[in-house]
Amino acid sequence: ENTRVFSDKLCREQDKSFIDKTIAEFLPQHFGETLAADNKELTWFSDFQREVEFDPETGEDIGAPKIYEPAYSWEHVSGKAYEYLKKYNEQYPSKCMNLVLFDEAMMHLMKINRTIQQKRGSAMLVGVGGSGKQSLARLAAYTSAHFCFQITITKTYNDSALFEDLRILYIRAAVKGESVTFLFTDAEVKSEGFLEYLNSMLATGEVVGLFAKDERDGMCGEIRNDFVRDNPGMEENLLNMYGYFMDRLKDNLHVCLCFSPVNAKFPIRAQKFPAVFNVSINWFMSWPVDALVAVSTAFLSAYKIDCAKDERQKLYELLGSFQAQVRETCELYIARMRKYVYVTPKSFLCLIDFYK
């Protein structure tokens, strides 16, 4: 819990290491050596480990029960994630995702999954381009059985078009009671007004001018039966039903923001839109070398290379080490020349494509 609450918000490896060191020192002092030894290794939790269940009467697939519990094993959790990824690609062939779920990616998947499975849980994923924010958010929404929605930006997309999309999400989340994940990236901010609406949505749930009074009253009438079932004895008036409508909306609508810290407007927006930055923040750090090797192995395993099998593995490792070395050189370049050069996971994927 401490690593989720404190460590995830930090953007430097040394700060995250400091949290881990502090917890390791604190545990034996206050909880004893035995408990400290039992919790030396971080235990990961997830709710997508159970097998799919079927209705005993009809034999229909009713999905797997969502029980948040400790991971049975890393291999099991990873295997279930790949199962869900395969199902997602079969269900949405136009949005097919070719992902390599290395350890870091699995950790981020479980963090996002944990956040959006909680009532009123929204997340902000912060990382450079190509680090896997959108793909992992979509997969997390799919494993959570949420309806995942992302706006499609066009030349004519404006505030009215955004309102139309938001109305659909509000009806799904509040009237129909469905769990909805709204995926929003900084590339989709056509005007700062978009963030103003999101700020209102995350702060109070209401967006001024989204619904006319007669539309709002109509939606309150639609949820009357659910209101009576969940609030026995409460007076049936529009005020109480609208309060129930807003509570259900906040519980079911989860916003997943994918922002890049490289964007010059990122720190300015943090000051202007506090509710947007008051969600669970998860920083996507640089991919470690073993992750780079796993990605290069996965993408080049089907590519024919004229060499022995053991030499091929060394080539994959060499390709991964190139990226890590360039990243270290960039840090040195910043320190010496005060000029920023960004080497992102996207540039690594481009390197692999160029190699092919």
Image: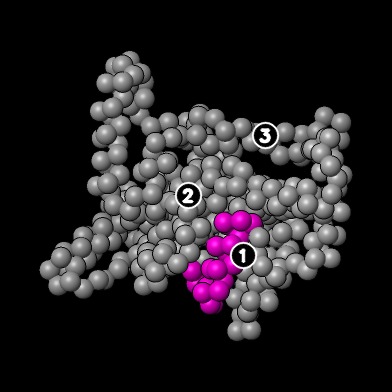
| N-terminal-most mark, 2 or 1 | 1
Amino acid type of disc 3?
Answer: Pro
Q: Position of residue 335 (x, y in %)?
A: 15, 65
Amino acid type of disc 2?
Answer: Ser
Label annotation for residue 272: none
Q: Find out whether residue 53 is within the magenta segment.
A: no
Q: Which residue is mark 3?
A: 65
CB within 8 Å, label 3 to label 1:
no
Camera-near label (2 vs 3) is: 2
Q: Which residue is mark 1?
A: 150
Q: Nearer the viewer, residue 273 or 92?
A: 273
Is residue 308 something one can see in this rendering? Answer: no
Q: Nearer the viewer, residue 301 or 199?
A: 199
Q: Position of residue 176 (x, y in %)?
A: 78, 52
Which residue is drawn at the image coordinates 43% and 35% (left, top)? Answer: 1
Density class for disc 3 (Cα within 10 Å; few <14, some 14-19, many ≥20) is: few
Residue segment shown in magenta: 186-205
Q: Position of residue 178 (x, y in %)?
A: 73, 50
Which residue is drawn at the image coordinates 59% and 38% (left, top)? Answer: 48
Gap between marks 2 and 1 measured at Cα: 19 Å
Say left or right for 246 vs 98.
Answer: right
